[in-house]
Image (spheres, coloured by chain):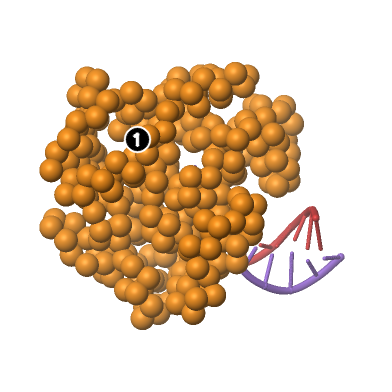
Chain colours: A orange, B purple, C red
Amino acid sequence: MIKEYSAKDFIPSHIFECGQVFRYTKIGDENYEIISKDKKAIVEKQNDKIILQADDLDYFENYFDLKTDYSEIKKELEKVPGLKDAIEFGKGVRILNQDPFETIISFIISANNNIKRIKQILENLSKSAGIKKDGFYAFPTLEQLVNKDVDFYKQLGLGYRSEYIEKTIRVMLDKQFLIDEIREKDTSDAREYLMQLSGVGPKVADCILLFAFQRYDVCPIDTWMKKIYFEFFGINEPNVHKMRDDFIQLFGEHAGIAQQYLFFYKRSFVD
DNA sequence: AGCCAGGCCCATT
DNA sequence: AATGGGCATGGC
């Protein structure tokens, strides 16, 4: 099925290459293939229209969060000194509604890793544990990973993160961690709950909350945000926790979205 | 060749 | 609560 949408506040390259998601392939100018969970879509921007092609359009309408008005959010954030350039640069960024399980596993793997290799590992994982669909491999489910041991992950190149994934899968299987519990908690409690998982620390927890639970009042502090901190506050702050608090105080309830504009902007100078 | 990557775990203080 | 060392692997 195929359907058209307004391209207001929607630029595929900004959405996919701002670091929130890994299973995408550029197939042309503002034309991307995206795999989420066990579904695939093709997205292309043509002038002021977004053309979306997928078997499950409902899923991807929610995935792209088409109901949220980013003009309002950007208007608020632009008032913060130092954000305007980054927002202008990444004006087509939207925060996706990603699958919680896939996001948890993906961002455990993302820790102290580079994006190119993260993408490769997630493809390896899908190919070797997910089911084959029409022309792609679905992301593995919890059930498909419960029988995998540490060596399985090591062979896929996960390195020392193999133990984290294996433990996390086991805890989920034992029902000591329930994804649905997260929705019931406020952001702070949800963050603590997520950090029970092996391989989930403050930064990964923030990414999961931001990318899979629409919690915008977080601020993932990675190596890039550490570099950006000095530009905003003029000091070299060694305490990551304080950095996060300072950013959230400055950016407000949409700090997580501000962080995405900054991450995308800062990284663009390297690539 | 050596530093770095969307950091976390664990021991120690 | 906070600090510091160690860590698999590969991109650049």
Q: Nearer the viewer, residue A155 or A92?
A: A92
Q: Nearer the viewer, residue C12 or A262?
A: A262
Q: Position of residue A251 (x, y in %)?
A: 62, 30
Residue located at (38% from left, 50% from top): A98
Is residue A112 in view?
A: no
Above or below for A82 versus A133:
above
Residue located at (62% from left, 39% from top): A226
- The local secondary structure at tag 1 comes to loop
Above or below for B7 versus A235:
below
Left or right of A119 in this view: A181: right
Say which quadrant the C terminus of chain A sits in.
Answer: top left
Tell me where residue C1 sits by quadrant: bottom right
Left or right of A58 in this view: A98: right
Left or right of A133 in this view: A156: right
Say which quadrant the N terminus of chain A sits in.
Answer: top left
Label 1 environment density (alpha carbons within 10 Å; few <14, some 14–19, many ≥20): some
Is residue A205 in view?
A: yes
Above or below for A161 versus A106:
below
Q: Position of residue A174 (x, y in %)?
A: 49, 79
Residue identified by numbered label 1: A66
Tell me where residue A232 sits by quadrant: top right
Query: What amino acid is labelled 1 in the image?
Result: Leu
Query: Chain under label 1?
Result: A
Q: Position of residue A248 (x, y in %)?
A: 65, 37
Q: Position of residue A234 (x, y in %)?
A: 72, 27
Residue located at (24% from left, 54% from top): A39
Residue located at (44% from left, 22% from top): A71
